[in-house]
Image: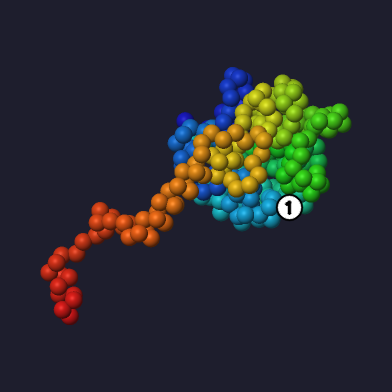
């Protein structure tokens, strides 16, 4: 059955956990969708895991549109949520609405996600008023990495915790249908989940959130170098891929691939005619 923002609301009411994974291409989206994930996030994390940037700041609207459209073609049941990239909404409420509209019209998104709490509540409200569902994102917001001085847990101090709660209430009041809590102490995330009527989706925010989201390359051990503490490895796909690539290289080098079963034949008489001119 097709998942919608209504499915998220029903899951919250019924205390059913929500599952969300990132995807950035048709093939992966199709696999995740077939597996039964509730929602797919076309995250601006593609800047790092697909494009090789050190953070998300260089990701463009066209990047998001292209990857979102590919995902939308691959998934038929999961709710498609697409990130609004850096500077696509911060500049003005008008820009926020226009760019959210582009992600829906050109990228096939069924909802958009943007980072920020109180300061961006007017942007959320305007996008929702334009009939585009919004998933909010508070806590450690990667587009603010330079402001935070790195990827750091948020809400550990009294002032930080109060600000997170204020942000959570603001995005709910603005009309967000759900909110991502990233890198937030588990007890604080549990409290926020309790006081909100909309679902919380955790990433590094403990088990008491209404749902969870992970970058699929992290949870399948496909990343190189740093892996976040919260990213449990559910399968070692990276090792399987490396093994497969090495076997291919070996067989091409030693001439065992392609074998007869992987080649096509031509009639002997036709080939004779070809070689005899």
Residue 80 shows in the view: no
Q: Residue at x 80, y 44 (%)?
A: 148
> Can you give x and y, in whole percent of width and height, for residue 73 in the image?
48, 47
> Can you give x and y, in whole percent of width and height, for residue 1 in the image?
47, 30
Residue behind mark 1: 87
Mark 1 surroundings: few (<14), some (14-19) or many (≥20) residues within 10 A: some
Task: Decide which of 218, 23 is in the foreground and name it.
Answer: 218
- Residue 62 falls in image quadrant: bottom right
Residue ranking furthest to the top: 14
Task: Decide which of 138, 157 is in the foreground and name it.
Answer: 157
Residue ranking furthest to the right: 159
Residue ranking furthest to the left: 269
Residue ranking furthest to the front: 254
Q: Residue at x 81, y 46 (%)?
A: 149
Quarter of the picture holding the C terminus: bottom left
Asked if residue 227 lies left or right of residue 92, the reply is left
Secondary structure, mark 1, is loop
> Can you give x and y, in whole percent of width and height, for residue 270 in the image?
15, 70
Residue 262 shows in the view: yes
Number of numbered markers: 1
> Can you give x and y, in whole percent of width and height, for residue 242 in the image?
48, 48
Q: Residue at x 61, y 19 (%)?
A: 15
Q: Residue at x 81, y 30 (%)?
A: 156
Colouring of the image: rainbow
Above-or-below relation of 277 to 39 = below
């Amino acid at each position: 059955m097709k998942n919608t923002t209504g499915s998220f609301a029903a899951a919250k009411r019924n205390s059913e956990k929500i599952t969300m994974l990132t995807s950035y291409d048709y093939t992966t989206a199709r696999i995740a969708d077939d597996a039964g994930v509730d929602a797919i996030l076309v995250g601006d994390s593609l800047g790092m895991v697909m494009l090789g940037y050190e953070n998300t700041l260089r990701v463009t609207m066209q990047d998001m549109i292209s990857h979102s459209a590919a995902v939308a073609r691959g998934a038929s049941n999961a709710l498609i949520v697409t990130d609004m990239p850096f500077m696509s909404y911060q500049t003005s409420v008008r820009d926020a609405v226009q760019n959210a509209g582009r992600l829906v019209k050109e990228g096939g998104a069924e909802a958009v996600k943007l980072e920020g709490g109180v300061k961006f509540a007017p942007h959320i409200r305007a996008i929702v008023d334009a009939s585009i569902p919004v998933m909010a994102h508070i806590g450690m917001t990667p587009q603010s990495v330079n402001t935070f001085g790195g990827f750091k847990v948020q809400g550990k101090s009294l002032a930080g915790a109060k600000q997170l709660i204020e942000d959570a209430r603001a995005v709910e009041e603005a009309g967000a249908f759900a909110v991502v809590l990233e890198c937030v102490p588990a007890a604080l995330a549990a409290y926020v989940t309790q006081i909100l009527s909309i679902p919380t989706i955790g990433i590094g925010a403990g088990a008491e959130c209404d749902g969870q989201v992970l970058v699929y390359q992290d949870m399948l051990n496909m990343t190189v170098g740093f892996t976040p503490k919260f990213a449990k490895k559910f399968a070692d796909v990276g090792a399987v891929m490396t093994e497969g690539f090495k076997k291919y290289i070996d067989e091409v080098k030693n001439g065992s691939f392609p074998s007869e079963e992987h080649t096509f034949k031509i009639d002997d008489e036709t080939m004779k005619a070809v070689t005899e001119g």
